[in-house]
């Protein structure tokens, strides 16, 4: 078990970087570590005046911002359990989480406060505005004065860094209640203990090349553990400077922001990387002349080097590594990125592991894998031959949750009788514990002769075809059908007529089937006119379409 305490990681980070830049809102305010400490202590004083105690819960509802990060740190530094709520949750889910978690306080963005049903939650006492820490609603008329007094105190009195200390936690105590929204549609509160956060942070410190003062752009949802851990919690412990973006950016915004910030480490989800590849690289390398030039030795390497330089500039040009996680990356994109020796790595994890299960640095990983099992974790494949026969990936170790909050049935179902967490993902491992993921167990389709079909692999191929934005494979009485949402931006840019689309898609289908074994071939493409509904991680909610 890790010996370092979460409290020491953060206390040391603030003391050692007291006057260094800590947080910035993109095109907004800048804060040093001492500025953030002062706001944290103001919130601490308010919690005390409100009667909040160690183990109580507060919820934070909003998009990425310096104040969101401050609220989060104010909770874990005072022994209070934080409940991050994804801003994309609807009103029903938002209130379910507030109610189910028994949160006594919500600190939320102005634009999202209308989602909160304050009158019908007996546990909820107070709602604070995230942007300026002002009072929105309270059951006690004196709360306003307590809030004002708390923030006035540290305006009038200097905070010495020696007096800024994080509260200690027991390793098994829940620090975060993370409510997931998966592709199956269920929402459960994952209890992430102190040991999980420490184990994840220590691994990142030991394997990711960041230093004090390095820059990070936080744009993945902070209410999801992938963005929370690697774009926020881990960089703070090293004294990095984090710039927060409030929205999931388009490729154009990424180019602008990353060009200005020039971060040293970049986290992303496949959807963004695949869009950049499809819109900025594929049109160039698919030109007839370019295809000829890329077959000429010597000239090919020069062209690929130029493409790599241009791609690096898209992300600011100063990063050591681009880490991709949250969903599978298209095999075509991975193959091309390896070909140009682009510094990217693919990781694997889940909320229940806070999140890390596997990762390896870009220059030591294996193509097609999701990295190597991380420290302080074990993995096994539930099959007779884990190296060759696909089975469920099961893990145990310090990163694993303690269970689902107030849901003993779901907790029992998540673990095997001998204590291994069932990930629900299918895959194999090699002798060096590199994990190769094939798909989700609940998505697997049984072929006509008992073959295992992993729809995610077929969908990744289709998504790279002309004029396809995204797709879902469905099994219709033994026939595979692809529901396809067209790329209307590309269609408009190339002046394609809508009546031409069915013929183009039929050509796509024939090209696809020529590359697939017979039992995986798709019988038809069905065009849909609306984008598929997604989780905050940008995974399609498959249960709504299959």
Image (tube, grey):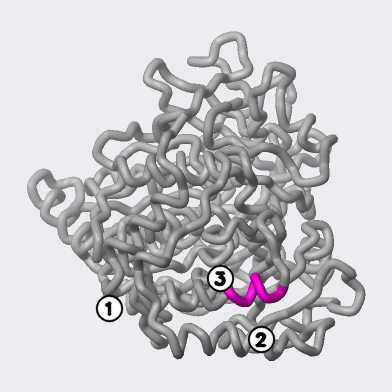
In the picture, residue 440 is in which quadrant? top right
Classify mark 3: helix, strand or loop: helix
Q: Which mark is residue 71?
A: 3
Q: Is residue 526 visible?
A: yes
Residue 83 colored magenta? no
Give left or right: position of 23 versus 183: left
- Of circles 2 and 1, the one toward us is 2
Q: In front here: 480 or 42?
A: 42
Residue 109 location (% of width, % of height): 64, 81
Q: Which residue is mark 2?
A: 110
Confirm or deny contact between disc 2 and disc 1 (CB under 8 A).
no
Q: Which residue is mark 1?
A: 260
Work out whether residue 512 can be spotted: no
User: Magenta segment range?
Assistant: 45-50
Determine contact: label 2, label 3, CB under 8 Å. no
Residue at 53% in and 41% down: 196
Magenta: main secondary structure equals: helix
Q: Is residue 47 magenta?
A: yes
Q: Nearer the viewer, mark 2 or mark 3?
A: 3
Q: In the image, is residue 272 above or below residue 511? A: below
**Which of the two discs, 2 and 1, labels the residue nearer the N terminus?**
2
Q: Secondary structure at mark 1?
A: helix
Q: Which mark is residue 493?
A: none
**What is the CA distance from the residue labelled 1 to the residue labelled 3?**
27 Å
């Amino acid at each position: 078990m890790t010996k370092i305490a979460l409290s020491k990681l953060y206390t040391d980070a603030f003391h050692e970087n007291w006057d260094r830049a800590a947080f910035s809102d993109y095109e907004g305010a800048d804060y040093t570590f001492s500025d953030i400490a002062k706001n944290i202590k103001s919130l601490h004083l308010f919690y005390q005046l409100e009667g909040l105690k160690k183990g109580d819960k507060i919820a934070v509802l909003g998009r990425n911002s310096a104040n969101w990060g401050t609220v989060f740190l104010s909770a874990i530094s005072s022994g209070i359990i934080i409940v991050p709520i994804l801003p994309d949750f609807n009103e029903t889910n938002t209130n379910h989480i507030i109610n189910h978690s028994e949160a006594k306080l919500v600190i939320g963005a102005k634009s999202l406060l209308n989602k909160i049903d304050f009158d019908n939650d007996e546990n909820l006492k107070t709602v604070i505005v995230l942007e300026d820490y002002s009072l929105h609603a309270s059951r006690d008329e004196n709360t306003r004065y307590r809030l004002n007094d708390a923030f006035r105190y540290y305006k009038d009195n200097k905070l010495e860094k020696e007096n800024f200390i994080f509260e200690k936690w027991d390793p098994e105590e829940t620090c975060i209640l993370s409510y997931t929204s998966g592709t199956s549609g269920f929402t459960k509160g994952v209890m992430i203990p102190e040991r999980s956060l420490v184990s994840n942070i220590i691994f990142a410190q030991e394997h990711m090349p960041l230093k004090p003062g390095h820059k990070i752009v936080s744009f993945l949802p902070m209410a999801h553990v992938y963005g929370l851990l690697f774009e926020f919690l881990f960089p703070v412990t090293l004294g990095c400077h984090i710039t927060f973006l409030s929205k999931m950016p388009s490729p154009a915004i990424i180019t602008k922001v990353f060009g200005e910030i020039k971060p040293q480490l970049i986290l992303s989800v496949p959807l963004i990387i695949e869009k950049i590849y499809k819109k900025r690289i594929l049109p160039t390398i698919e030109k007839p002349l370019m295809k000829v030039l890329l077959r000429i030795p010597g000239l090919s390497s020069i062209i690929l080097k130029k493409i790599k330089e241009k791609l690096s500039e898209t992300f600011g040009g100063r990063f050591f590594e681009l880490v991709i996680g949250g969903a599978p990356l298209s095999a075509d994109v991975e193959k091309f990125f390896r070909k140009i020796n682009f510094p990217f790595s693919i990781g694997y994890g889940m909320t229940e592991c806070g999140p890390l299960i596997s990762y390896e640095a870009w220059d030591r990983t294996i193509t097609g894998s999701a990295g190597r099992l991380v420290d302080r974790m074990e993995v096994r494949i539930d099959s007779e031959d884990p190296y060759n026969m696909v089975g469920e990936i099961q893990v145990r170790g310090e990163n694993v949750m303690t269970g689902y909050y107030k849901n003993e049935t779901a907790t029992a179902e998540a673990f095997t009788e001998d204590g291994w967490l069932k990930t629900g993902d299918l895959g194999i491992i090699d002798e060096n514990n590199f994990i190769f993921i094939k798909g989700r167990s609940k998505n697997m389709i049984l072929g006509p002769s008992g073959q295992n079909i992993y729809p995610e692999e077929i969908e990744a191929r289709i998504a790279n075809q002309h004029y396809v934005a995204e797709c879902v494979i469905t099994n219709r009485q033994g026939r595979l059908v692809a529901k396809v949402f067209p790329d209307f931006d590309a269609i408009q840019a190339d002046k394609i007529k809508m009546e031409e689309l069915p013929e183009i898609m039929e050509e796509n289908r024939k090209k696809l089937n020529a590359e697939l074994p017979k039992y995986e071939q798709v019988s038809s493409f069905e065009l849909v006119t609306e984008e598929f509904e997604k989780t905050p991680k940008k995974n399609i909610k498959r249960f709504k379409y299959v």
